[in-house]
Image (cartoon, helix red, strand yellow):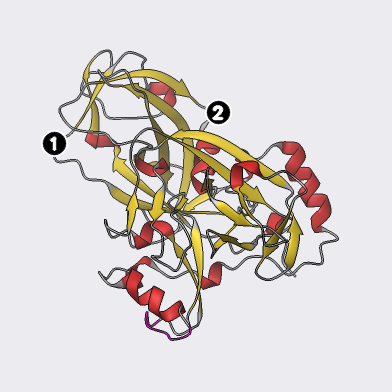
Amino acid sequence: MYSQVQDTAMPSQRLPVYLAEAFHVTDGANLGDSLSFAQELVLDDIYALSMDAQVKSLSLRTDADGQHFVASDRGLGTQDARVFLDCVATFMPPSGDTIEVLVLVEVDDAGGVVQIYGAALAPLTPKTDYALVGIDRDAASTRLAQLACVSFTSGTHITMATGEQRKVEDLKVGDRVLTRDDGPQELRWIGHSVQRASGEFAPIVITKGTLNNAGDLRVSPDHRLFVYQRHDHIGVGRSELLIKARHLVNGETVYAAEGGFVDYYQLMFDTHQIIFAEGISAETMQMDTRTRPAVPKEVTERLQRKAANNSTRGGPVGHLEVHESLLNRPDTVELLKRASSK
């Protein structure tokens, strides 16, 4: 039996990042320098993004001790190299908005710096001045955790144990929700955050009917949907699939909703579960070393105590996740709809 608090099959986490040298100081104390460690950053320095800067992919895995490593050799970094979360740097463009950049440092076996990365949590554009207005060394793990927390947006209808369709913002701790594997289960924790709907925090919209959903489903980009294939149209070789919402984006029936702010809700049970949102199957938040910094300490301790006596079957299902490469085709959404239809 698995415990969601002691899950060893945690999914990797993909971050879109810039190499540090793509974001450099154009005016200020560190003139000419690239993005760097918190101790080397100087407030009020003006940064600019290089015209040829490209967003690249850095995949991270987190071990049971909360240490981060490069998860794959298909993107940036050396596989299994250690990665440190240094700080969150906050920048302000002329518009007056603020943009947070998570600073990550890859090191070699001897502890030497190999590369510094900047994961912008909202889009950066060339030919724009960005003033450094904040440096927070304590917020990095929390911001990474927030990116890893799978979330439903306000207005999402959740299927209750009674069959009632209730909006996620109206749920309360203790409510009984219908789960796919364990029947009715009590909600143990509900998280809520308000994020700027931009970049990595822009929700993915799966429009009504696209996957046989009863209404538009809006979820965080890494939220995984459960699909049961009656026919293996994708060619995965199994009937049960977990697919990240971001990998279904086609710009038409599935798209990222940029602009304004979004209310995100996280639902947690004694174990990681599959529930029904807008009539289709979607995962709930999983407690692990990636997401723990975003959860109140007392909630973590309570779930750890319950895990020892847990008799439900829910648990890690990471082995069901479909790699992005198998979904990189224009007809993926239509194939999944047909494969899961009666």
Is 232 contained in the magenta span? Answer: yes
Q: Position of residue 192 (x, y in %)?
A: 59, 37
Magenta segment: 230-235
> Does the segment drawn in magenta span residue 157?
no
CA distance separating discs 2 and 1 = 31 Å
Residue 138, disc:
2
Instruction: Please give the label number shown on residue 51.
Output: 1
Q: Which mark is residue 33?
A: none
Residue 125: quarter of image: top left
Q: Residue at x 41, y 40 (%)?
A: 105
Residue type at mark 1 is Met
Q: Position of residue 117 (x, y in %)?
A: 35, 40
Q: Is residue 209 above or below residue 43?
A: below
Q: Nearer the viewer, residue 46 or 244?
A: 244
Callout 2 amino acid: Asp
* Lateral position of residue 177 relative to residue 238, left or right: right
* Element assignment for label 2: loop
In percent of width and height, residue 199 lies at: 35, 41
